Image: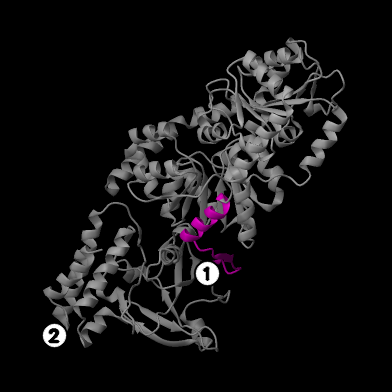
Amino acid sequence: MRGRDVHWILWLYSLLVYLARPFYLLSFVWRSRADRTYRQRLAERLAWQHVPQSAKGGIVLHAVSMGEVVAATPLIERLLAQYPQLPLTVTCMSPTGSARIQQSFAARVHHYYLPLDTPGASRRFLNKLQPQLIVLLETEIWPNLVAQAAKDRIPLLLANARLSARSARGYRKVLWLMRPVLGNISAIAAQDLATARRFNRLAGRELATVCGNLKFEMRIADDLAERAAALTTTWQRPVWVAGSTHAGEDEIVLAAFAKARLAIPNLLLILVPRHPERFQAVADLISARQLSCVRRSLQQAVQADTQVLLGDTMGELMLWYQAADFIFIGGSLIERGGHNPLEAMCLGKPVISGPHVFNFAKAFAALERADAVRYARDADELAQCLLTLAAQPQDTAEMARRGLVLYQQQGGAAVRTIDLLQQQWQPSRLQISAAEHVELYTSQHVPVQWQQASTWQQLDAITGQSTGRNTVYFVKPTAEPSPQWVLRHYYRGGLIGKVLRDWFWQVPVAQSRAFAECRLLQRLRLFGLPVPEPVAARYQQRAGGFSADILIKRIDGATDLCQLLQQQALTATDWQALGHLIARFHRLQVWHSDLNCHNILQDRQGQFYLIDFDKCGIRQGQQWQQQTLERLLRSFRKEAGKYPNFAFDDAAWQQLLLGYQAH
């Protein structure tokens, strides 16, 4: 798909989002009637909030609501452990998700709502946080956020991704929108092989890798069993938990409870509605049934005559599941698609469900195969399931054990996701000095106050220079033997460059040419491509604009192809190897904006490198690839016209094309 088409598609999508924005915000006001948290922090919904300096330059992870936050918890914990030097910002869309983030991580992470997916809000959000990496959970694919991340050269990973056949069919109907969006995603960590295949077909390329389901790595609080035991020891009665229930389901659960109590009079029901705005409605429903009820939010104790405990607090579902003898998974008696059974499985509890489980079809299919789940379609069947499980304690314990074993067999998703992440991204360190300049560090140490060539001259660190359109300096950073660095200052080209020279219009730091090139080089090296290793990028504000520099490692013993061909001819094998290398870049959709013989190096071992990735990037489509080859051919012919002994002819070009086409 052509870049112009992608632009219009994104423009049309953005127009629809802008038109929907008033209704989106009004929905929060409407929902705030039942839950006032919906009208709080509205500035974050449009990315107008203040962001502290300590939140900048790290990782952003987005999990839409509480269920996704719970699933992401093991991954978040691993990111905190793996990259303690980087700030981690966790975003969500719902107040329940926000409460869970703050409860689980407190000050260890920064937290905001992800803004509405308009171009302006996405741009402001990324400009404020300047992240190095974005991780989206499951299918939270927001076109403008993804497009802005690509523009800022920020790798974006879709983690714990799942895509049903039904959803894939829907996405294929809007392939004109989805394929460009998927083209800007760096990698997808899929829950299963079917999901990976569906994403790869949608993307038209190998994008997804099977990493497993993060929900099989749920973190259980160390004191959970102790807290649950303190409750159940006091109660001394069988406990049935109906978790994450929806409207239309609570009535069925209460009817089943009434039937089950005829055989188990001391049965205690813990009813936990999925959404907090329904807490009062469910309390009224229990009262209408004339059942003795206590509410957790009021800290009311369960008495001997209590029949129902209403779990009307957030973040305590695992506590209720730990206290349970039997667990019903809500959202399954109605066509909601069911909720996550893994929380019950990981605690070794027997699982009961309604028939509608398409949201977690694979997990329930595995439970069925292991004979570790019981299904009920209505109140009568639900009551019968409870009575059967209560009457057969040994069989029930074995059923729960099979579910736990199944859960334990599915671990490792967080580790595999981190491995995939590391294939796409290398962390760096962001620092802002008092002089209002910003430096992006990679693995090397660079003095905080490094400036332009004059500073390195004062340090007696410049060992040489190369002149072309602009001067490039070779820098020896320490007195000890070490690789040399290359210092390049960014200059404007063309007519305007004669006036402004090295002054550029103000842009976000992430979009500055030095930062963009540094990040791109990091990513290309992770792809295994022969490009220079970036050391640091510098952005200095200057009177409404900025100037920029980049430091890269010098490729030892390498000569640019223009100079080399003035001295000697390449063999046919060399030309084919060069063509093969260019094809590798193109296969990975790497676009070099100025591929010419000055930007190709060959070292003493015959290895070719591509350099100078200013204003380059990852680009979809193929038509530009032929244009890149034509540009390279023109540069060879231009130099051959200037130098009589320049070792290039049509036969050499045909060998290069032979290597390119053979890849």
- Residue 581 falls left or right of residue 120: left
- Residue 124 in picture, x, y percent from top left: 51, 48
Amino acid carrying label 2: it is Pro
Farthest residue in the left direction?
Answer: 650
- Residue 350 in picture, x, y percent from top left: 67, 31
Which residue matches tag 2? Answer: 644
The residue positioned 76% from the left and 47% from the top of the image is 222
Which residue matches tag 1? Answer: 442
- Residue 377 falls left or right of residue 512: right
- Residue 230 in picture, x, y percent from top left: 85, 36
- Residue 149 falls left or right of residue 229: left
Could you say whether the residue bearing mark 2 is in a helix, strand or loop? loop
Q: Is residue 592 visible?
A: no
Is 222 drawn above or below residue 397 in the view shown?
A: below
Q: Quadrant of residue 269?
A: top right
- Residue 518 in picture, x, y percent from top left: 45, 66
User: CB atoms at circles 2 and 1 under 8 Å apart?
Assistant: no
Marker count (numbered): 2
The local crowd at label 1, few if under 14, some if 14 to 19, many if 20 or more residues have their Cα within 10 Å, is: many
The residue positioned 42% from the left and 80% from the top of the image is 554
- Residue 234 falls left or right of residue 456: right
- The mark nearer the N terminus, 2 or 1, is 1
Viewer-side residue, 629 vs 655 = 655
Q: Which region shows up in magenta?
A: 413-438
Q: Nearer the viewer, mark 2 or mark 1?
A: 1
Is 196 drawn above or below residue 610 in the view shown?
A: above
Is 130 drawn above or below residue 112 in the view shown?
A: below
Q: Is residue 428 magenta?
A: yes
